[in-house]
Amino acid sequence: MSEERLSLGKDLVGLEHLSAEQLQMILDTAEPFKEISERRIKKVPVLRGKTIVNLFFEASTRTRISFEFAEKRLSADTVNISSSGSSVVKGETLVDTARNLEAMRIDMVVIRHGASGAARFLAERIPSNVINAGDGWHEHPTQGLLDLLTIRDHRGPLQGLKVCIVGDILHSRVARSNIYGLRTLGAEVAVCGPRTLMPPSPEEMGCTVFTHVEEAIEWADVLNVLRLQLERMEGGYVPSLREYNRIWGVSSRRLEAAPRDILVLHPGPMNRGVEIDSDVADGDHSVILNQVTNGVAVRMAVLYLLAGGQPEKAEAAKQGAES
Ligand code: CP
């Protein structure tokens, strides 16, 4: 009897419904792809002939550029579209935009959109693979994956590890993807921040809740510090940025009280001096730039797997053999 091959399916919309085996498959597939970015000539023929559209309706530095690097380093043909430079400004809908791209025979769409559910909406309407690069407050699955990979690189298996997500949980798609991925892989997850920036029931997502950052630092092996999403706030969530930093900011003074060597992540972009102080962001606990490096490998892995690549053949595929 032949075993059914593990796959991701057609799309990557979120981490909520992925199994531990699927998450491990993505992380393990990212491992051999890391080395491509260290080469002098950073190009392998893994996705030769594939056409990928990066459709970004919201600003992005890390995600957009690392998807584009991942695609180009795997030899895909890529096109970048932002809402401001497209017919979206003339009122064209998301589906019409995508159907017109489909008519030009594309293979994959990477989408960032301000509306929660936009990636799923698109995935259900077009035959191309759809990858969610962040949709509203919903999920940012490749950020969650690169965070998992970075934690695993520095602390080993996630089972039993204590990870606290600190800051603006309410507005954060990164928090949601982290919670789903970490919990599925057996980590203990906590959230910490002002009550005004907490979703209604973090406990129902399996999270411990801390209201004092000192308690979170006492408890955690890993802190994932989130950006205060100033663009999604109408005001009134926090008294002032200075007050926020005084009460919840991650500073080296606070980290000195940690009972263990704590790892600090931040998805970026950072508000230095608000949720994280510069001496922490640039200090020994920080793996923030490792996250960015891992983002390219994780996105290569997701592109490869959605294109039908087999995890056990990733090493051979990157050397140029058929996958
Ligand atoms: N972490 C992240 O999503 O950053 P960008 O908004 O720059 O893509």
Image (cartoon, rainbow, N blue to C red):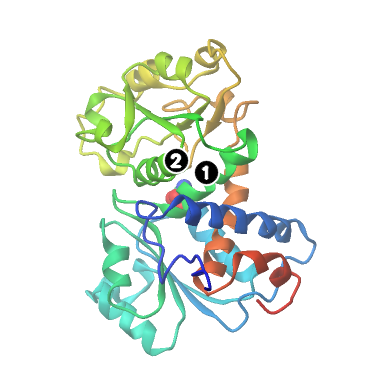
Residue 76: quarter of image: bottom right
Residue at mark 1: 148
Label ID, residue 214:
none
Q: Quadrant of the C terminus?
A: bottom right
* Residue 198 appears in view: no
Foreground: 17 or 97?
A: 17
The type of residue carrying mark 2 is Leu
Q: Residue furthest front?
A: 1
Specify whether tag 1 is near ligand 1 (CB below 8 Å). Answer: no
* Residue 178 appears in view: yes
Foreground: 95 or 258?
A: 258
Name the N-terminal-most of marks 1 and 2. 1
**Real-space Cα separation, disc 1 to disc 2, in angstroms:** 7 Å
Q: Are marks 1 and 2 in contact (CB under 8 Å)?
A: yes
Helix, strand or loop under label 2 = helix
Q: Position of residue 201 (x, y in %)?
A: 21, 33
Left or right relative to 82: residue 31: right
Left or right relative to 320: residue 74: left
Q: Position of residue 251 (x, y in %)?
A: 50, 19
Vertical position of residue 288 compared to residue 138: above or below = above
Q: Residue furthest right?
A: 40
Number of marks present in the image shown: 2
Residue plotted at (24% across, 75% down): 90
Residue 191: quarter of image: top left
The type of residue carrying mark 1 is Leu
Residue at mark 2: 182
Vertical position of residue 146 compared to residue 192: above or below = below
Other-residue count near label 1 (Cα within 10 Å), few / some / many at <14 / 14–19 / ≥20: many
